[in-house]
Image (cartoon, rainbow, N blue to C red):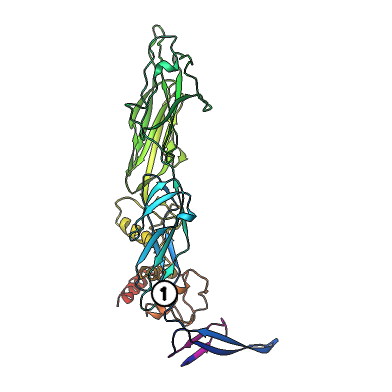
Amino acid sequence: MSSWSADVKTGEVSYTLSGGAAGDTVTLPVTISSANYEDTAVNVVITLTAKDDQAALVIIGKTTVVYGQTLTLTTTGGSGTGAVTYRIDSAASTGEAAIDPDTGVLTPVKVGSVCVIATKAGDKDYNDVTSAPFVLMIKPATPTGEPRYTAITTSGRTLKDAALTADGSTLKPHDGKLEWVDVKGNTLPDDTRVEANVTYKWRFTPADTNYTALTGSVELYHVSGGGWYDSYCTIKATAGAGGSISPSGNVSVREGRDQTFTITPDQGCAVFDVKIDGRSIGAVESYTFENVRRTHTIEVIFMKANGNPQTGVFADVAAGSYYEDAVDWAVENGITQGTGDTRFSPDGICTRAQIVTFLWRSVKSPASGTVNPFTDVQSAAYYADAVLWAVNEGITRGTADTTFSPDADCTRAQIVTFLWRSRK
């Protein structure tokens, strides 16, 4: 042992060993002193290893994915130059999925929970490291389209005469159970008499359990009163950039009938909010106006989807903004997770702690190996290792010998200086 020191405040011991081989042990006698207690001596036994253990490896990604879509997982942490590979722990999963071992792209196969494990290979300096299990849920998809039926033109007919069928329809998937139901969801018998000017509800339950049920409604038999004309109402349907709503524009709906709107995000986007007559109802994939008697509006807002488990989407990262790709890159590489469930706060001010943490994570969160000289940097703080790494690399020396000022604003001058020093 060529050096030995102990921090009397934190109890942290630093030492340097040379020579020896893997499996050898070194015994260090340590005396613990206190003003209120007698001294006590203990022996610390250190076992030498051929390689160091890597820093903890953590999987990052959204915790839900809809069947029919894909999800990309990434990792943060680990040490060294080894490659990261992914696998599915089928024994710990109720659903099924396939995952590319090299890219982390997950493709759902069956609805349920899926457990993913990542491993970062060791190199000449580090052992292999395996992540904790990452559990995500595969949610069922919503079918699309409508069934076919025969309009009723004379009185005395029944639901059987309406000939509800999936054959030749636009329903996807195609196979499943199609039936007429009442407002409570109970199946209506085929001999139910079709009344004039009444809306009847249908339900399609796909045979593929990876899909939810789909419902809709239709007026099978319409009779106009003598001398009167049918009355129509207008529903204005609009969608922002990032997806579509169908039907769209000014949609005419016969008074008393139902009208369903289907919402479809573009690739890489997600529904952020849906507003009905100006009132938010949340991020839904479809909406039905029932028994329409007046004009309405439906507005859909789409947001960029970036696959982060905590953020999911960022409502304040506009598509096409100069920083959009940078935000995506930062999230996908575990450099930041945003400031809230749906916020990145692109115009927010960064602290000194945040900036050095971004830099540290951008180089795969290496071990610091430095004694902490700062009284305002607690060892449990998320930025502690990043600060010590930055000091060790000569990127910063703090604001004084014993203070780093982690919560102070980081100026533009400081940021570009940190960047410049980190690249030297």
Task: Give the camera-side residue of 116 and 239.
Answer: 116
Residue at the image position 43 percent from the left and 12 percent from the top: 157
Question: 10 Å neighbourhood of mark 1: few (<14), some, or many (≥20)?
Answer: some
Is residue 138 on the magenta stretch? no
Q: Taking 312 as reference, is 333 above or below it?
A: below
Q: Disc count in the image?
A: 1
Residue 76 seen anywhere in this rendered image of the structure? yes
**Residue ranking furthest to the bottom:** 2
Judging by the rendered image, the residue that carries numbered circle 1 is 127
Query: Percent from the top left, x then y, of residue 377?
Result: 50, 74
Task: Give the camera-side residue of 51 and 366.
Answer: 51
Q: Taking 57 as reference, is 237 above or below it?
A: above
Query: Percent from the top left, x then y, of residue 401?
Result: 47, 83
Q: Taking 197 as reference, is 260 above or below it?
A: below
Name the quadrant containing residue 309: bottom left
**Residue ranking furthest to the front:** 91
Question: Helix or strand or loop: what does disc 1 sit on?
Answer: loop
Q: Quadrant of the C terminus?
A: bottom left
Residue at the image position 36 percent from the left and 58 percent from the top: 104
Q: Taking 6 as reference, is 261 above or below it?
A: above
Name the quadrant containing residue 152: top left
Residue 7 seen anywhere in this rendered image of the structure? no
Query: Percent from the top left, x then y, of residue 245?
Result: 35, 36
**What residue span does the magenta drawing correspond to?**
4-19
Query: Percent from the top left, x then y, of residue 318?
Result: 34, 51
The amino acid marked with disc number 1 is Asn
Task: Give the camera-side residue of 119 and 406.
Answer: 119
Task: Give the camera-side residue of 111 and 316.
Answer: 111
